[in-house]
Amino acid sequence: MLAGDVEDAARSLLGCTLSAGGVTVRLTEVEAYAGTGEDPASHAHRGRTTRNAIMFGPAGFSYVYFTYGMHWCMNVVTGTPGVASAVLLRAGEVVSGVDAARARRLTVKRDVDLARGPARLCSALGIDRSAYGLDLFDRASPVRLAWGPSAVPATAIAAGPRVGVTGAHDLEWRFWIAGDPTVSAYRRHVPKTRI
């Protein structure tokens, strides 16, 4: 289900659960990223590097990276072996382990904000660099992905531009469960002007 078209894979991840660190999150928002040459916003756009090597498959593994010098973000690899693509996990609803998530996110006042945004999601789950390259479907893995009890119907999925990317910023590859309060706010990337 994951190894194929990155847009289809992204939609299929909505409603799935991700478990780590005593917390389970139901995914409510994701973003698709294709591979070399075709998606200038992708970490694999310019080819394979040490950082993005896991993006080149196989599907079902985790691609975790550090951003802005302070946040971890996690993707699910979705391509066939040798073809880079991944889906960024942008937001979710904490469905179990709420107390553990709250302990990691002490400044959050509302539970809907515990995993609202990719860095917050990783923080709530306790995900860091050690999760890079894990098989998310291996029962022994400390980070596990599971299909939801039922697929989110296509009529309940909204699509729009990805958040904060400089390349292909109008490509509608961000998908979310319409009306879900845990979905993050859209912010278009605004380049900094140099003086």
Image (spheres, rainbow, N blue to C red):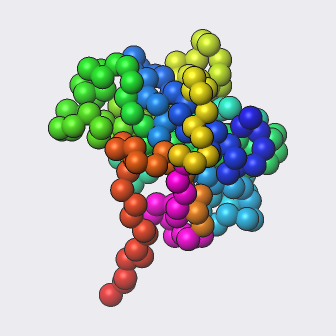
In-front residue for pair 134/96:
96
Q: Is residue 95 above or below residue 193?
A: above
User: Which residue appears farthest toward the bottom when viewing the image?
Assistant: 195
- Of residue 108 and residue 132, the one placed in the foreground of this image is 108
**Residue 187 vertical placement versus 13 (above, below):** below
Q: Quadrant of the N terminus?
A: top right
Quick check: 171 left or right of 125?
Answer: right
- Residue 55 visible? The answer is no
- Between 3 and 156, the one lying in front of the other is 156
Q: Does the magenta run of residues contain 95?
A: no
Q: Position of 22 compared to 131: left or right?
A: left
Q: What's drawn in magenta, residue-wise?
A: 157-170
Picture layout, residue 151 above or below residue 84: above
Q: Quadrant of residue 159?
A: bottom right
| Horizontal side of residue 40 vs 174, given as left or right | right
Q: Which residue appears at 61% of the width and 52% of the height?
A: 32
Q: Residue at the spot x=53%, y=23% of the render?
A: 143
What residue do we see at 26% from left, 33% from top?
Answer: 111
The quadrant in which residue 47 appears is: bottom right
The reply to whether residue 151 is visible in this rendering is: yes
Q: Position of residue 133 (x, y in %)?
A: 62, 32
